[in-house]
Image (tube, coloured by chain):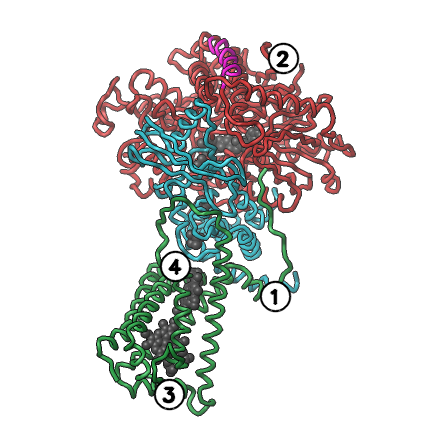
Chain colours: A red, B green, C cyan
């Protein structure tokens, strides 16, 4: 199979304009003749649906949430990047582009990333006009903070709730279109499969989560905006319901899955407190601006943090990376922390964390400043741990947080299935092997507001005058039948173990072998263990209740079922990628001083995996990455 | 899919009616009428103080009320204007109160088996009840001291002789008790009312919000204490014919 | 620690409901309230009983999906805390914990502890937005916003749409939610053009689902984001102005 990323010709800075000019348009009067299905109402989905509604397309949105406002984007804390250069500190589209490419360890597409930087400014304009209450200076103009992996101050924020405020902006824009009748919203409706007929995406099959009814919806094009798959690890910073079902189902129907092993482990999360913990809570990365990270220099330090004298503390990030110090990118910070904890210097009762200390900052800036900056985060921390971070240093440890991998898409954000688009965290897009802080909100909104609504016209214009396929066609009936079978199979097992038990077990395997550090041996082990566990799952899972009413266990089960296969593919990809880059760290490939070692000769490509049937080995297609504007250097934050 | 449906849009009426049709509008009217009623209660309380200066003063005060406006207007006309205004306010207030009560009762989705309030006060929860008590009291009170209709009024009622009517009336223990109860109910009602009306009218400012509770407490205390003093004074014999 | 739960169970929308009692022994005090329910649910499943349906997602107090009436208090005993952030250390060993769904005519019960809060979406759809098509926005720094204004707007904008205010209100009024959404937009320059149309539309829609505010102030106490009822006063003020202005405009409308 040949992959064409459809990257426009011409100089980097002109590609997007040139492309928009050369792609066919749909005339305003014709737009209402097109139906588009959008799965997911996060930043990407809500942004896209609202914008396409404004343009005049007829849009249907689906989400498993009771309200479009609850998408996981709501949880984003720290902020959103944009190359506004309001701070006059040398920022520019090119620098944002460069930082993102470098931060992604040279495993992303130049053209896409540059376009992202180009539209980043418009996102801030749009959000501000919607009434997003970004933080401001006393002069009334927008404030910025600096964020991990960048040396300029380009992050816009709304207290510690940037994602919430941006999502509410998009949600309100969407609400306006729902009122206007251009968008029809289906809430508490989970997409369980997509329908492909003669090679094109023609619709979806969904389950009404209240009545259990399985129904089909057809459209001229389908857009997946279904977020990331970090919950494959069970314990992650993602919301409980986040799942990979939508993209995995699309993958099974022919959409290539790119770089599944590129997952991000976020350095600043609250360490696990005990084994039945249900999720991990992120402490915004912005804390690293003022907090200093350290562990006791001595193994098995027993004293409480306060009693450990300065000279017996090891500020390991500042020591190892003088230039960036505590602000090194996430993957680097996470691995460094793991190294210390593995060496037995871990802090806390379970010795599973490192200190994030504000004593110095409070001394320098005063408690009030720290409170205005991080007040709600400190509160959140105290609620969970019962410790007061103004007095005792926080304890943090890395946790699965974001997935750079996702469905492969071309420059138009279309997957390898014509008519199927993927936006936001769900695609593999722009972050390469590692995402910089505050760049996911930017990408989700760039895709949703500014890119997809433009690029989708190219595909739609082809089918002007045609109607969406009738949902009575065999293609739909067949898919409905498959979905029903799968549900019945799950309910039928009536075994002896709960869904959560299996999810936990899966999580342990993936975290152990495909987490922060990976090895050929571990991965091979995982690849044999996961299918075995999956087998047990289908034979021995226990689900109470019926399929024809609200049944949360059933919903969970369906998601976990798909996670087995997805996790296996993650491991296969990790095993195949014989290098260490970004979030993907192979123990076998390190420099003498233990830093990640990339292998540009052999691995400067995107791994796009194809589904070849259950149990069969997936097929690999490579999209070679050409770098015409930046030359590949080893990332050094020393 | 979720279920709640948009309410059907009904035809629009001229804005004052539209306004009163809305709950927020009704609350606004309640607040305004509440203020009027408060004003009356307060001045009425002050006027009644004259009882302590003996028959002449209070009777003369009653006269004065009727003479309001002096020779410029027909006798008692201004008093009647006041009465009508007051009556109107009371009617609006009560109507709003009862219709809102119905709305809220409809809006409740069954009661909690266990409920532990934090902010709700006894006063705020009994507004409807205390209000109703006050309403009935007013009727009794009018029959007693204004119209002189037995059995509410004392056996020999002298139109115009406010003082002896009042003393005669309060010498009856049950009546004295009834007045005391009614005024306590009134106290509860205007305590929450006085605090609440600013919120309803949309006057809210951090600096002045602190004063609201104090204002409510002070006003209530003044009115209730003075009003209670009359029946008590008569009972213990400070006031007698 | 060992606790006993009295939980409201109800099969479906208009089916009869009743309390069932479950004992939950051996719960760690580090567990969050919802983790405690997870454990109970796994145990229920294993002895062939249907698990308790309750809504949740982010489990960090921001998505607004969770919301339970715990011992007669919305989101439980801890002030300014959503159900999912509540931890078992706030309870004592041997406690009997009563768990009910939000109860309001505007929030019909769907199953067990899950209610339908989509009336909130209807309120926002009525006008809880700024009309600005994607792409038509001016530069973000073109309109300065006084920092105090931005902060005040943010104080209201933090609403997570959980519905605890309605659950708490003796009148089942949605004033605090609506006031918060209104204040968020009405305090910002960007919200001014539609200010009065927005107020009228949102309040009228609100009243078609919920009760009326008699200033009990209970909502403020229940709100996990501690949103102030001062915003309700603002709502009242703006609504009165709106009826007056829009009323005068009615002729032209
Ligand atoms: C705790 C936390 C903090 C973060 N902080 C930041 C930050 O500070 N800055 C930053 O840039 N990024 C941050 N991120 C990352 C960022 O929030 C996400 O990557 C981004 O919001 C993803 O948006 P999305 O629209 O792609 O997907 P989501 O917001 O996850 O939305 C997914 C949508 O798809 C729907 N959906 C999924 N599957 C189905 C299905 N099968 N059927 C129907 N609907 C479905 C869901 O209901 C939901 O509406 C953070 C992430 C986390 C977890
Ligand atoms: C006669 C029967 C009465 C009834 C049934 C009644 C009932 C009510 C009710 C239900 C409220 C609403 C509380 C609130 O919205 O905050 C209220 C408010 C009020 N009432 Fe009455 N009331 C009555 C009489 C009176 C009288 C006689 C007075 C004068 C002393 C009075 C003064 C007030 C005031 C000042 C308020 C506050 C208005 C507001 O907050 O909007 N009421 N009343
Ligand atoms: C113990 C306290 C009170 C005393 C001693 C008292 C006394 C009187 C007297 C003597 C009159 C007749 C005046 C006249 O005929 O000229 C009167 C009239 C009246 N009182 Fe009271 N009163 C008291 C409390 C109240 C309260 C609490 C209310 C209302 C809530 C009230 C409402 C009225 C009204 C409406 C009238 C008729 C006024 C008129 O003539 O238009 N009174 N009162
Ligand atoms: S106002 Fe508070 S209580 Fe009401 S929905 Fe918003 S956050 Fe929840
Ligand atoms: S509790 Fe209810 S009465 Fe008003 S102040 Fe809050 S809405
Ligand atoms: S689960 Fe999201 S707020 Fe509680």
Q: Which residues are magenta?
A: A525-541
* Spot occupied by residue C49 in the image (x, y as percentages of width and height): 46, 26
Height in image: B194 above or below C92?
Answer: below
Camera-side residue of A26 and A170: A170
| Residue C248, picture quadrant | bottom right
Mark 1 crowd level (few <14, some 14–19, many ≥20, 10 Å Cα)? few
Neighbor class of circle 4 (other Cα within 10 Å; few <14, some 14-19, many 20+) is some
Q: Earlier in the sequence, mark 1 or mark 3?
A: 1
List the residue tagged with mark 2.
A612
In 3D space, how far apart are the residues under numbered discs 3 and 4 (Cα atoms)?
Answer: 37 Å
The chain containing the residue under callout 4 comes to B
Label number found at residue B63: 3
Are discs 4 and 1 less than 8 Å apart at CB? no
Residue A540 belongs to the span the image colors magenta: yes
Residue visible at 45% across and 89% down in the picture: B75
Q: Nearer the viewer, mark 4 or mark 2?
A: 4
Element carrying mark 2: loop
Taking the image as shown, residue A316 lies to the left or right of residue A168, namely left
Q: Which residue is mark 1?
A: B14
Are the residues at dot 3 and dot 4 in contact (C-beta closer than 8 Å)?
A: no
Say if disc 1 is inside 8 Å of ligand 2. no
Q: Main secondary structure of the magenta part?
A: helix
Between the C-alphas of marks 1 and 3, the distance is: 43 Å
User: Looking at the image, is mark 3 or mark 4 earlier in the sequence?
Assistant: 3
Residue under disc 2 on the same chain as residue under disc 1 = no
């Amino acid at each position: 199979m040949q992959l064409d990323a459809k990257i426009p010709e011409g100089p980097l800075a002109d590609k997007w304009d040139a492309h928009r000019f050369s792609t066919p348009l749909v005339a305003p009067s014709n737009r209402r003749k097109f139906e588009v299905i959008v799965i997911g109402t996060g930043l990407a989905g809500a942004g896209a649906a609202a914008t396409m509604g404004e343009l005049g397309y007829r849009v249907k949105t689906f989400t498993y949430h009771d309200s479009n406002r609850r998408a996981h984007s709501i949880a984003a804390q720290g902020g959103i990047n944009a190359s506004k250069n309001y701070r006059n500190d040398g920022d520019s589209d090119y620098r944002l582009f460069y930082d993102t490419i470098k931060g992604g360890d040279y495993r992303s597409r130049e053209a896409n990333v540059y376009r992202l930087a180009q539209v980043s400014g418009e996102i801030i304009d749009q959000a501000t006009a919607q009434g997003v209450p970004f933080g401001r200076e006393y002069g009334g103009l927008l404030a910025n903070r600096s964020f991990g992996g960048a040396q300029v101050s380009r992050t816009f924020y709304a207290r510690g709730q940037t994602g919430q405020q941006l999502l509410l902006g998009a949600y309100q824009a969407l609400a306006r279109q729902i009122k206007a009748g251009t968008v029809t919203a289906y809430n508490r409706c989970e997409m369980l499969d997509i329908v492909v007929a003669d090679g094109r995406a023609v619709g979806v099959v969904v389950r009404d989560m209240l009545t259990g009814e399985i129904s089909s919806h057809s459209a001229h094009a389908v857009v997946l905006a279904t977020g990331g798959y970090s919950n494959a690890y069970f314990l992650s910073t993602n919301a409980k319901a986040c799942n990979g079902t939508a993209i995995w189902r699309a993958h099974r129907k022919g959409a290539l899955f790119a770089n599944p092993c590129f997952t991000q482990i976020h350095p600043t999360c609250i360490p696990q407190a005990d084994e039945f913990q249900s999720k991990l809570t992120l402490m915004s990365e912005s804390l690293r601006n003022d907090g200093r990270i350290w562990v006791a220099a001595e193994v098995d330090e027993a004293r409480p943090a306060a009693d450990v004298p300065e000279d017996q503390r090891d500020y390991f990030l500042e020591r190892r990376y003088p230039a960036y110090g505590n602000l090194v990118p996430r993957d680097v910070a996470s691995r460094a922390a793991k190294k210390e904890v593995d060496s037995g210097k871990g802090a806390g009762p379970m010795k599973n964390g490192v200190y994030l200390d504000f004593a110095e900052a409070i001394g320098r800036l005063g408690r009030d400043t720290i409170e205005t900056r991080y007040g709600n985060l400190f509160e959140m921390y105290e609620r969970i741990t019962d410790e007061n971070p103004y007095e005792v240093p926080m304890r943090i440890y890395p946790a699965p947080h974001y997935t750079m991998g996702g469905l492969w898409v071309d420059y138009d954000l279309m997957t390898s299935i014509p008519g199927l688009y993927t936006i936001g965290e769900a695609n593999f897009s722009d972050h390469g092997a590692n995402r910089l802080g505050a760049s996911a909100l930017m990408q989700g909104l760039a895709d949703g507001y500014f890119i997809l609504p433009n690029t989708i016209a190219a595909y739609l214009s082809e089918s002007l005058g045609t109607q969406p396929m009738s949902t009575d066609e065999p293609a739909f009936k067949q898919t409905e039948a498959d979905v029903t079978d799968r549900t019945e199979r799950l309910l039928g097992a009536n075994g002896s173990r709960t869904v959560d038990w299996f999810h936990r077990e899966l999580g342990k395997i993936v975290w152990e072998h495909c987490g922060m550090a990976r090895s050929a041996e571990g991965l091979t082990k995982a690849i044999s263990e996961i299918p075995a566990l999956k087998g047990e799952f289908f034979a021995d899972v226990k689900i109470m209740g019926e399929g024809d009413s609200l049944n949360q266990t059933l919903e969970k089960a369906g998601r976990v079922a798909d996670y087995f296969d997805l996790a296996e593919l993650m491991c296969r990809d990790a095993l195949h990628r014989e290098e260490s880059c970004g979030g993907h760290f192979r123990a076998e490939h390190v420099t003498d001083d233990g830093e990640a070692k990339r292998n540009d000769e052999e691995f400067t490509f995107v791994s796009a995996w194809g589904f070849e049937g259950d149990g069969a080995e997936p097929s690999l297609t490579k999209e070679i990455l050409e770098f015409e504007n930046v030359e590949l250097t080893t990332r050094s934050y020393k | 899919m979720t279920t709640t449906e948009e309410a059907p849009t009904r035809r629009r009426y001229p804005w004052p009616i539209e306004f009163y049709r809305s709950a927020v509008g009704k609350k606004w009217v309640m607040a305004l009428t509440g203020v009027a009623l408060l004003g009356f209660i307060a001045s009425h309380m002050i006027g009644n103080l004259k009882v302590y200066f003996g028959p002449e003063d209070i009777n003369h005060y009653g006269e004065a009320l009727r003479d309001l406006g002096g020779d410029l207007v027909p006798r008692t006309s201004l008093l009647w204007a006041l009465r009508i205004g007051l009556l109107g306010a009371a009617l609006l207030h009560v109507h709003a109160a009862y219709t809102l009560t119905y709305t809220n009762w409809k809006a409740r989705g069954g009661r909690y088996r266990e409920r532990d309030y934090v902010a709700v006060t006894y006063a705020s929860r009994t507004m409807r009840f205390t209000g109703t008590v006050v309403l009935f009291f007013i009727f009794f009170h009018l029959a007693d001291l204004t119209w002189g209709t037995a059995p509410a009024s004392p056996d020999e009622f002298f139109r115009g002789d406010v003082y002896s009517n009042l003393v005669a009336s309060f010498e009856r223990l049950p009546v004295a008790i009834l007045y005391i109860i009614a005024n306590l109910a009134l106290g509860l009602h205007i305590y929450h009312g006085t605090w609440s009306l600013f919120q309803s009218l949309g006057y809210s400012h951090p600096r002045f919000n602190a004063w609201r509770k104090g204002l409510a407490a002070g006003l209530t205390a003044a009115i209730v204490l003075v009003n209670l003093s009359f029946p008590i004074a008569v009972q213990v014999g400070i006031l007698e014919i | 620690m060992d606790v006993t739960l009295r939980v409201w169970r109800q099969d479906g929308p208009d089916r009869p409901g009743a309390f069932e009692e479950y004992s939950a022994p051996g719960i760690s005090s580090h567990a969050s309230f919802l983790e405690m329910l997870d454990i109970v649910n796994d145990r229920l499943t294993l002895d062939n009983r249907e698990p308790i349906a309750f809504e949740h997602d982010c489990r960090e107090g921001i998505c607004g999906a969770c919301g339970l009436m715990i011992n007669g208090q919305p989101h439980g005993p801890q002030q300014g805390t959503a159900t999912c952030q509540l931890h078992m250390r706030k309870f004592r060993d041997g406690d009997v914990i009563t768990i009910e769904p939000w109860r309001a005519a505007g929030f019909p019960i769907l199953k067990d502890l899950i209610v339908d809060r989509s009336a909130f979406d209807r309120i926002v759809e009525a006008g809880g937005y700024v009309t600005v098509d994607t792409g038509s926005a001016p530069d973000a720094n073109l309109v300065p916003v006084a920092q105090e204004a931005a902060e005040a707007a943010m104080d209201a904008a933090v609403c997570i749409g959980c519905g605890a205010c309605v659950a708490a209100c003796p009148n089942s009024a949605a004033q605090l939610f609506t006031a918060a959404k209104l204040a968020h937009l009405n305090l910002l320059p960007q919200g001014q053009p539609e200010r009065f149309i927005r107020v009228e539309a949102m309040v009228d829609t609100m009243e078609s689902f919920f009760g009326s505010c008699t200033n009990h102030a209970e909502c403020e106490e229940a709100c996990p984001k501690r949103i102030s009822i001062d915003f309700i006063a603002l709502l009242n003020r703006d609504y009165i102005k709106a009826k007056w202005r829009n009323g005068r405009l009615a002729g032209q409308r």
